[in-house]
Image: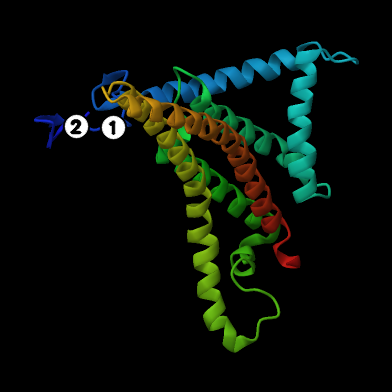
Amino acid sequence: MIALTLPLEGGPFTPPSVESHLPALFSIGSFEFTKQMLLVLLSVALISWFFIAAARKGQLVPGKLQFLGEMGYGFVRNSVAKDIIGGKDFVKFVPFLFAIFFFILVNNIYGAIPILQLPSFSHVGGAYFMAAMVFVTWIAVGIKRNGIRYLKLAVVPSGVPLPLLFLVVPIEIISNFIVRPMTHSLRLFATMLAGHLIVMLAGEGIRFLVEQDNVALKGVSLLVLIGAIAMYALEALIMVLQAYVFVLLTAIYIEGALHADSH
């Protein structure tokens, strides 16, 4: 909290605020282990435990846990990998897309869980890393499938007249190799941070209004609470949608790299 000295009934005014930068849980030299790092490690453990447990028995008539596991796997396999990449190529990319989707989903959902209340990708470093990993992957896929000429295929659209290439090629370079990975990361980061801050500010605003002596302000806190609940539900929906959008774009980029010579 930062106090601003403003005249209000003869005393200082302390506005509502939030602390978005949490202190490290512990430090080893210059290395700081943060809550975000802990949640990322926890997500790996939770995802691994869930799907190992779901696949352990492998019954013909699945139980609830196996059913949920198969439904999650089937969603990524059929609705993302198969529908977007298609052909025989999609199968080899299912594990990669599957891991990305559930890793992002769990780390996003943390923001909707009381006490934890921190989506891991509300810190930009994690979003940059995920986008960089996807960027390297689809570039590598394109080069493996098409050879080094993929770099040409990615920036020189077929059928464009030669004079226009001097304009189109720089745009394609910027679009594919700079804008694409940046928007891929910032879309995830910005939505998680914005939703997280809105809920935090609403909660702090409610506390501030309730503490006031004015009855009208206490009443307004109920309206803020209703709005906060609505935003909380919207944020939970966006957490799921952003995991889907991220993995969907990953599949689109991979498909484009695989079939660059036919686009």
- Residue 77 location, quadrant: top right
Q: Is residue 81 visible?
A: yes
Q: CA distance from mark 2 to mark 1?
A: 7 Å
Q: With 134 as the anchor, is 22 left or right in this view?
A: left
For label 1, the crowd category at 10 Å Cα-Cα, with few meaning under 14, some 14 to 19 and many 20 or more, is some
- Considering only vertical position in the picture, is 170 above or below 143? below
Number of on-image labels: 2
Residue 18 percent coordinates (x, y): 31, 30
Tag of residue 17: 1
| Left or right of 263 in this view: 164 | left
Q: Nearer the viewer, residue 7 or 136?
A: 7
Picture residue at 61% right of the left edge, 63% below the top: 148
User: Is label 2 in contact with label 1 (beta carbons under 8 Å)?
Assistant: yes
Q: State the residue in front, 78 or 142.
A: 78
Q: Quadrant of the C terminus?
A: bottom right
Q: Amino acid at mark 1?
A: Ser
Q: Is residue 215 left or right of residue 41?
A: left
- Residue located 47% across and 48% down the image: 186
Q: Residues within 10 Å of mark 2 (few under 14, many from 20)?
A: few
Q: How is the image coloured?
A: rainbow
Q: Residue at x 58, y 85 (%)?
A: 164
Q: Name the residue rendered at 55%, 75% in the picture.
A: 169
Element under disc 1 = loop
N-terminal-most mark, 2 or 1: 2
Single out the residue that lies furthest toward the bottom.
Answer: 163
Give the residue type at disc 2: Ile
Location of residue 138 in the rendering, given as x and y in whole percent from the top left corner: 61, 51
Which labelled disc corresponds to residue 54?
A: none
Image x and y of residue 26, in percent: 29, 17
Q: Which residue is mark 2?
A: 2
Q: Nearer the viewer, residue 157 or 148?
A: 157
